[in-house]
Image (tube, rainbow, N blue to C red):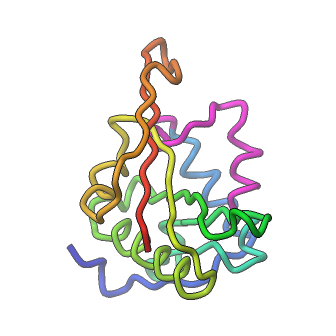
Amino acid sequence: MSPPSNFDIRFSVEEDLKFLQQWFADPKACDDFPFGIEEKEEALKNWIGFAKYKACLTGLIDQTPCTIGSLFLMPYKKVAHHCSFYLMVDPQQRRAGIGTSMVRNLQHLAKTRFRLENIHVELFDKGHLLPLLLKEGFKQFVRQENFAKIDGLSRARILLEKNL
């Protein structure tokens, strides 16, 4: 599915943090992520902090942010050939091709701007992003059962990667 014709992507700015905070206010919207409610604020500031390195992209519909993805660059030369990334799509805009477009653009940014060899992502099983990432060629390399308890239910942690 292609994103809507009024969809555009730009480098993120720190002011985009308010959109991440708004989307993460819905606990079901952030099911994919390993941080808890008490860790959320610091995690989101760290996430948008990569905007200063132009390693963070914001997708817009009619100039309003609807998705943000960030490459978590490694600071040491020995490991600077790979990184983690996070991606969040506004829950109201899901299933419209926006997430797929952002994953592809993050891969392109990782490969061309930062010359990364692979990227990986950590999420929970049954998350919103898992089917999209598998469709885009990411391969699971770790599954850790009972990694976290969310609302009393055990969830597995899944790590996926893709060679660029």
The residue positioned 43% from the left and 15% from the top of the image is 153
Residue 29 magenta-drawn?
A: yes
Quarter placement of the C terminus: bottom left
Number of numbered callouts drawn: 0
Quarter placement of the N terminus: bottom left
Q: Which is the main secondary structure of the residues drawn in magenta?
A: helix
Q: Residue furthest top?
A: 152
The image shows residue 150, relative to residue 138, as above or below, that is: above
On the image, the x and y values in percent for residue 89 come to 45, 59
Magenta residues? 27-48
Q: State the image quarter where residue 52 is shown.
A: bottom right
On the image, the x and y values in percent for residue 137 come to 29, 63
The residue positioned 61% from the left and 56% from the top of the image is 20
Left or right of 39? Residue 81 is left
On the image, the x and y values in percent for residue 34 come to 56, 37
Is 142 or 37 nearer to us in this picture? Answer: 142
On the image, the x and y values in percent for residue 103 come to 42, 69
The image shows residue 98, relative to residue 138, as above or below, that is: below
Residue 57 magenta-drawn?
A: no
Q: State the image quarter where residue 155 is shown.
A: top left
Is 12 or 160 nearer to us in this picture? Answer: 160
Left or right of 101? Residue 53 is right
Left or right of 130? Residue 163 is right
The residue positioned 27% from the left and 60% from the top of the image is 95
